[in-house]
Every structure is written in C-alpha cells, then in structure tokens.
Amino acid sequence: MELYINGQKLDITLEDEKTVGDVLRSFEENAAQNHCATVGIHIDGKQINAEDFDKASQAPIDSVEKIDLSVVSEDAVADAFKSAAQGINETVDLLKQIPVQLQSGGDSKAKASITHLADTVDNFCHIIALSTLFPEKFGAIKVDGKNLSGFFEDFMPVFNDLNGALSSGDTVMLGDLAEYEISPRLKALADAVKDL
C-alpha cells in the first residue's frame, strides 16, 4: 500500500496496522501533533465521504493499493487569513468607488466590484470552514467583539439588502450599502485576521 499526502508519496513502514482505519488513526495522531488535519481522503482513486468512511476504514490494508490524503496545516490557514485580509482591503477600496461609478455611468464597473465582493466573501467563508479544524488557534477571533459566526449573522442581512438593491435597480441604496454598511464591516474583518 502506498500513502500520499497532498500528492506527495510518503515512505512509511506499517507496524501493527491491519486496516485502512488503523492507518488513518495512526496518521491523524501524527498530524494532530504537527497541527495538521485531514480534509480529504481518496482510496484507490475513489473519494471517501462521510457515508462511506466506516466501510472504507474496515478494509484490510492488503486490499488497498493507494491512500491519498488531503491535509491542511494550522499555519496554512493562518496564511490564508492574512492573504484574505489583503484581498478584503482591496475589495473595500473597490466598494468605496461604487457610489461615484453609479452616478457617472460606470454601472459595469460597479457590478464588477459587487461580483468581486461576492467572490471575496465566498473565499473567506471557505477559510473559516478550515479554521474550525483548529479551534484552539482560531476560535478566539473577534470582529467588533463578536466571533466569526456572530459577525456573519449580522452581516448577512446587509448582504441580502445589497442583493435586493441590485435586483430592484436601486442605485442610491446600492451605493449607500457598499460605502457605509459593507465597507466598514469588511475593514473590521480584515483587521481582525491580518496578524494571525
């Protein structure tokens, strides 16, 4: 059996491991000590999801040719947050230009900025999902006194208002939301994670 981590083959020597589950448990213990977590498992090219995990874990080692694990480290998540903070600050700069763009016929630029906003938030939510694997490191992040979950609970109604303004073509509301509601929230979010 061959074991790959993030596409790199590992030189391993099996000791008492007899099943795939034994190998995975052994690896997880080692990964936890190194502040890493498994985020994906492929066995002989087949992705193993939560429903298949128990059955796949029981498979004997000699029935498997290759286990390929996708792993993320605490440091990689911290770096992703720092990079996202920079991207969020760039998004804030774009959002502040929306009111002027809407008043001067730059509707396409304003819409591109809003698309950029959606992509930025989507990327950040993916990083948050990974950060939950390391609660000791990232569980204490606060944005304006709220944890990340509370921040996004408060943020989503504003995001929904933005969507409504887009749908109705209300450019005044769109500009006000971008400049006065969304930009300050995003700035606070970037400040909260830029130095992790």
Image: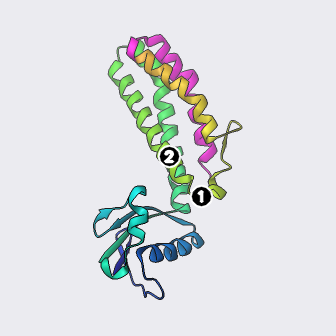
Residue marked by disc 1 = 134
Which amino acid, by three-letter code, is at mark 2?
Answer: Ala
Residue 167: x percent and y percent? 38, 16
Disc 2 vs disc 1: which is toward the camera? Answer: 1
The region drawn magenta spans: 167-196
Residue 174: x percent and y percent? 47, 17
Dot 1: what SS? loop
Residue placed most toward the observer, 53 or 186: 53
Which mark is first along the chain, 1 or 2? 2
Other residues around mark 2 within 10 Å, as few (<14) / some (14–19) / many (≥20): many
Residue marked by disc 2 = 84
Q: Is residue 100 visible?
A: no
Q: Is residue 53 visible?
A: yes
Q: Quadrant of the C terminus?
A: bottom right
Point 65% across, 47% down: residue: 141
Other residues around mark 1 within 10 Å, as few (<14) / some (14–19) / many (≥20): some
Q: Is residue 101 above or below residue 125?
A: above
Residue 185: x percent and y percent? 59, 31
Point 49% across, 13% down: residue: 173
